[in-house]
Image (cartoon, helix red, strand yellow):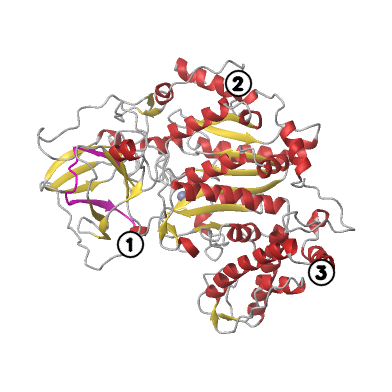
Amino acid sequence: MVPHLHAPQNLPGLSSAGQLSLVHWPHQCEVIRDRIEHIDWTPPRPEPLYTPMGLEMKPSYQPAGEGTVIYLTEEANKDSGFVYSQVRGLSPSKQILHQNGDNTLIFEARFESGNLQKVVKVNEFEYQLTLRTDLYTSKYTQWYYFQVSNTQAGMPYRFTIVNFTKPDSLYKRGMRPLLYSEADAKKHNVGWRRTGNEIKYYRNNAGQGGQQYFSLTWTFQFPHNRDTCYFAHCYPYTYSNLQEYLVAISKDPVKSKFCKIHILCHSLARNIVYVLTITNPHEGDKDTKRKAVILTARVHPGETNTSWIMKGFLDYILGNSGNAQVLRDNFVFKVVPMLNPDGVIVGNHRCSLAGQDLNRKYKSNLKEFYPSIWYTRNMIKRVMEERDILLYCDFHGHNRKKNVFVYGCERKQQAKAPNLHPRVFPLLLSKICPDKFSFPDCRFRVQKSKEGTGRVVMWKMGISNSYTLEASICGSKLGQRRSTHFNTKDLESVGHHFCDALLDYCVPNMKYYLCLKEHEEMVKQQAKVNSEGLNSDVLDRDSSTQTSNSSDSCDLVAHQLKLGTKIKTKTSGEHIHRIAKDRSRESKNVSFKMEVSTSTSLGQEQTTQGIETLHKIFQELDPVGREMCYASERGGVRPVSGCHPPKMESRSREKEEKIHHRVKLPITASVKQVGECFRFWFSGSEN
Ligand SMILES: [Zn+2]
């Protein structure tokens, strides 16, 4: 049974120290008592990638015995498997292994999400770093996050991390490490920023017995003397950060009415896995007609960027905008923001304390080993019993590719109704978020090796729109954001755009129907290629050798609607991948033009003509959603006569005012439940 909290209690006063003390660690983990905090900051302009000069050095690996070991943590991996946990972990032993009074840097990573196993001082300003493998495994090194103090400003430091195991890395393509200076945060209100020159990622000479290791090296200068700084692979987002966020929701008199926070289950270390239910209070039996949207994140702890996307999503959906109200009116959101809290706490890259990748365990019935996975699947099954699930999406970070994109699932013979096709939602997202989200990067094949993933299992359970959202931990290759890093605001914006895409999907407008049409064109193109026996996959854009002869589908629709956009015919002989990209770019422009032209420049006659044509297209394209056949207010198009009123509720002002009124209804379950939850933590007992 899914555990629930019981008697409502007053929400106790929550101190930050109180929250941190309730984090459970594997018993042998040493944890410093300092609270690590970082300020939120966005760089004034996107930070550029590093451009390799070709002259970067490749420092060789220093074997044991050479150099001075100045930092070493071995306790955590002493046991071969997880035994038991304790609140706050073990008090740490002193870690300063070198002589006091010199200028040697002092390293520390024994804090939440920290990862650094060993540091060897090679010479005065050069250090060799080794990362800790995921606990109870001998592999998975990628995530790093550590503190450095006793700094000297302006000196030429070099760090080299020597035990990565992946041959490919975004560090080969311009990604720079993140630096945080406490002095800069205090004096200048500056937070995490990119750093590093002479960046090189290469195979080193540390490998033995067939195992290969790869080094990341970079040079940098500290901004201040005697500063405390941090380095990280991506913007940290800890379990405590999540708890603080959830506490704020539970304390908010408005948000707590439509966001209920429950315990989904406990992790192996007895940390809480939260599930949020977000929907507006409903009247009568209307609620069961609301479709569900399921979102999960941080199954892989090192993919911290996904927590920022999730934060963006939650900020939006819990906000007071009219769009958020409409979404909460039309959907029930079930959100598991952190599937693997233990992994996040101990600073793992990929695994839980079972030493396994949880995103391969969605078929497993081993509830005790993989509780968050078992309970998530169970929760989704229950939701399916009472309502349709429109979409499932598990958020991930990608360590080799740039851009944001999705993996979906489809059968060879996909359903005829295009609005049910798994490619439509990502296509929509690519129109809304053209500088970050790449439709050509999306893939829809179900690989054997991915059968245990959330996406494939949920798809087989019957959810057509079942996705893995992949966000590069580096940045974008698209539009104005080409060759720049993502920052936390960019990641949050992906969460906002996800909501916008859902809104366009549930309250279809011009953009939605253009996407359907574009998709239909792609299907036709595929059929043509198939019939010509070219054996290429137009729909999966990784095909790289075939040619195509197509017109831009959005242009085609625009032409049909006589809305003043010009037809651009693609010549044959072009690369299919290129066509997909061009189409993605152009259709964005077209849809923009259409919205503008319908609302501003058309006479009544033209508008009516446009509406009627649009109506025909709707009927042709969307037999299932015919009842929703009307165009958005934003496009300036009025409802089409002969269509039924929409099932979904539109974003009219009156409606929004009504919603505003309705959300003020007092429903306090979530506050009480969370209050109860924190009461348990304070008493130190387990539910
Ligand atoms: Zn992942």
The amino acid at mark 2 is Lys
Of the numbered discs in the image, which one, if any, rests on residue 672?
Answer: 2
Q: Which residue is mark 1?
A: 172
The amino acid at mark 1 is Lys
Instruction: Identify the element where label 2 is drawn.
Output: helix
The quarter of the picture where residue 334 lies is: top right
Residue drawn at point x = 34 percent, y = 29 percent: 35
Q: Nearer the viewer, mark 1 or mark 3?
A: 3
Labels 1 and 3: the sequence-earlier one:
1
Q: Is residue 343 magenta?
A: no
The amino acid at mark 3 is Gln
Outermost residue on the right side: it is 642
Residue drawn at point x = 55 percent, y = 57 percent: 407
The quarter of the picture where residue 562 lies is: bottom right
Give residue 672's position: percent from left, percent from top: 60, 21
Q: Mark 1 to mark 3: distance in Å?
A: 53 Å
Give residue 96's position: percent from left, percent from top: 17, 33
Labels 3 and 2: the sequence-earlier one:
3
Q: Marks 1 and 3: CB-CB under 8 Å?
A: no
Give the extent of the magenta segment.
146-166
* Quadrant housing the N terminus: top right
